[in-house]
Structures are given as C-alpha cells and as structure tokens.
Image (spheres, grey):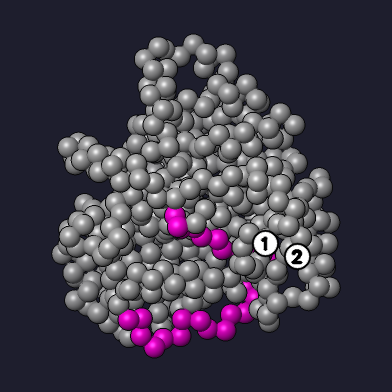
Amino acid sequence: MIEARAFFWFLALLCMLSGCGTIPDMHALLHDRSLYDSRSDFVGPDGELTDQQTERVMLRLEQHQKTPSDILERHLAFEQGLSDVPLVLGNKVTLLENGAATYQAMLRAIRGAQDNINMQTYTFTDGPVGQMFADALIERQRHGVQVNVEYDSLGSFGTPKSFFDRLRQNGIGVLEYRPVNPFAAKLPWSFSHRNHRKMLVVDGRIAFTGGINISEVYANGPSGSEEKGPLEYWRDTDIEVEGPAVAEFQRAFINEWKYQQGPALGQHNYFPTLEQKGNQIVRVIFSVPERFSLIYVTLISAIVSSQTNIYITDAYFAPDHQMLHALEHAAKRGVDVRLLLPSQTDEPLILAAQHSHYADLLDAGVKIYEWQGQMLHAKTTTIDGVWSTVGTSNLDWWSIARDNELNAIVLSHSFGDDMNLMFRNDIEGSAQIEAEQWKHRGFVERLHETAARIIEPLL
C-alpha cells in the first residue's frame, strides 16, 4: 500500500508539472464592473421569472435578512455574470449528515426508481456498502430501469475489475473515468485530471450530492455499526434535492457522460416535468480544469461580500494566497470567520500545509477548530445565514485546478439555519486552536509545514 501510494505521488508530480488548470486572477475578476451588471436569472417550475417576479423574490430574501448583506445583490450579480446557470426556485433541500443517513436516503430513492438512475462517484469500493449499492442497482436494472454508473479510475483503483464487470453483465451502463493505465485510456491521457464529483439522480426527480463516496470508511451500512462510535467513522455532509433544480444535476451528468463517450443512455425520461417541492432556491455549479473553477471564484466573491459570518468546513485545506487573503480580510473587518478542519487525514502533506496557514489566520482573527474524529471529509460553507454551499470541492489546489467538481448553492434562511446548527454541533466534537498555544509547537512540526508550503501547488 505504501509503495503504491508513493508510485502514484511520483506519477502525479510528473503530470502536474506540466499543469492542468489555472488559478484565476481574483483581483481582476472582482474589479470587473461588467460582471455586476447581470440580473439574477431566476427560474421556477413554469419557466423564467419576469423582472417583477424576480424583484419580489429578492425582496422576500432581504426582508428575512437580519443584517443587510452584499450577498443578495452584489455577489449574486457577480455569480450570474460568470455563469449562465440559473437560480432555480421551488426546491426541497434536505441536509444529510454522515454515512448512515445519506446511504439510507440514497438506497430508498434507488429502490423506488421507475425509469432511470444516473450515478457518479469518485470511489466505489467492493465491500459491504459497495455490494449493497450494486445489488440495489442491479435489481432496478432487471426491472427495466436504465442504470448508468460513472466512477473515477484513480479513486476506485483498489476495486477489482470483476466488481464493475458484474454491473455491466447485468445491463448497467458503466464508464471508467480516465483510466490510470495510459494504455487503456483515450488520448489525451492525464493522471492528474480526475472526476471528483459525487452525484446520484433518480428518475430525474431526486438528486444527491456532497462529499460522500460509496465506501466502508463511513459505516458498514445504512444502519451504521454498534461496534464503533460516531467519531470513529468519516464525517461527511450531503444533500437531497427534490424539485426543478434536479434537472440541472441531470444535465451535468448527461453532458459529462456524453463527453466521455459512455455507453448509450437509451430512450428514457431523463427530464420529466418537475413541480414545486419546497421554497429553497438552488444553483448547481460545476468546474472542469479546462477553464477556471467557477466554484472557487464564487466562494471568494461570497466571502468578500460577507457581513456577519462565514462558517467553512473543509477536508483538504491547502488554499492559494487569494483565498487566504479573503478570509483574513473578512475577519479583520469584523466578520465572524470560523474554519472547521480535520485533526488527522489520509493525506499527511495536506495536513502539514493546512497547519502552515494557522498563524496568519489566527493573527487576523479567524477562529480555527479541528475535528477530533477519525476523518473530517465534508465540504460545506454558509455565509450570512442565507448563502450556503454543499458539494464535492475542497480548498486545495487539486480541487481548484485539476478536478471535475460539483457544488450546489442554496439561497435560503431556513436551510442556512440548518447549516449553522450543524456547524455548531460539529464544533462540540472539535478542539479550538488557540493562537498562544500554537506559537509553542515544535521545531519538527514547523519544518514539515515549511516543506508542505513549498509544494502546496502540487497538493
């Protein structure tokens, strides 16, 4: 295992030296006045909203905002100016914490599928959880539901070929994203360009996304395990979406599937008519290395526009100087900036790079907490109680410049309250990093931090 990991790092370093994506110039983008001239594009179950309807939506959001926030005017205009992806009204967004709750909801949706299931994951393991999902997917395929599964070759490298062969033999469309073996891959081959998205869309009516993979690190199954406590499994966060925004998830999956020349999707009802299911407003954004990360740019803009609070949970925190500057500047102007980060990780270099930024962040007034469980894998943010995002993208260079990622932005005060409550509960299982205590860390630890900082663009 150690030799294999070292081999992968060697290949990754060689491939990344040539570059795959770019970090955008946020100063230029944030000062591009033309990006703030865009009117937010709101879409409801019956189509695009009129100017008057849009004004009423914005007014309702502003009336519920305890403290005025640039999020609802300046940032949303900037976000729309960069993307043609609409803000979709009429959705029900359910917050899912950890493996047991997420797997239960996903399997319930799969077992109730009537027409089609599209699933995209980074890691799909051949253990109890993976077999449970495979069995559920095969059962639906045998009953006439078209099932399509895309997995990343590197993320699922330890899964035997026979596992996916079984899916194919039962009629499921299976696509391996960019095989690690260059002789099995289509040109141009790239080791570092991975598909890190996790998404499940059922019947075009229910969608899931977040950080969770199909793996035993989360639990032995939907019921969890009585042998271990909650801190001994990986901590993750996902969402379940019902309503018109599901079409955006479906579109993202199908576009990627066709671009990668996956098996024929068949004549199925992938885009049914979708009715209003709730009051949440959702924008689905995704990134590819071929152009700058819209997720990264959007998050920095939201941080710059914040007025009251920024609560970020991140699994692999090794950001560039622009993200760090935005967080530090927000804290200095009085915004309550809090970071919940892992205390241990499956990538030691990332942890050292994470620690290398603590001193400057703490000096600026950023509050830092470290999760005391086995592994914190969630990727979430909530700002000013109304703008939230849950998805697959981390704050490291790999996510920003080299991975396909997907995040859902939710404009909702009630969902923001749920996110804030979850964050406060997570802090109860965390240890706060104090500035004075941090100054007395050992020489060896500082040395590791310096080394990790030097190679941070490769992480």
Quarter of the image with the N terminus is top left
Q: Amino acid at mark 2?
A: Arg
Quarter of the figure with residue 86 = bottom right
x%, y% of residue 337? 65, 35
Does the CB distance between marks 1 and 2 fall below 8 Å? yes
Going 46% across and 31% down the picture, which residue do you hit?
354
Q: Is residue 413 visible?
A: no
Closer to the camera in the image, 416 or 97: 416
Q: Is residue 276 magenta?
A: yes
Quarter of the image with the C terminus is top left
Closer to the camera in the image, 21 or 202: 21
Q: Secondary structure at mark 2?
A: loop
Mark 1 burial class by Cα count in 10 Å: few <14, some 14-19, many 20+? many
Reply above or below: 1 against 222.
Answer: above
Going 30% across and 46% down the picture, which residue do you hit?
15
Q: Which residue is mark 2?
A: 39
Q: Which residue is mark 1?
A: 80
Going 74% across and 40% down the picture, which residue do you hit?
308
Closer to the camera in the image, 351 or 453: 453
What residue span does the magenta drawing correspond to?
264-290
Mark 1 / mark 2, whichever is N-terminal: 2
Horizontally, residue 231 falls left or right of residue 79, namely left
Q: Is residue 444 magenta?
A: no
Magenta: main secondary structure? loop
Q: Secondary structure at mark 1?
A: helix
x%, y% of residue 159? 21, 56
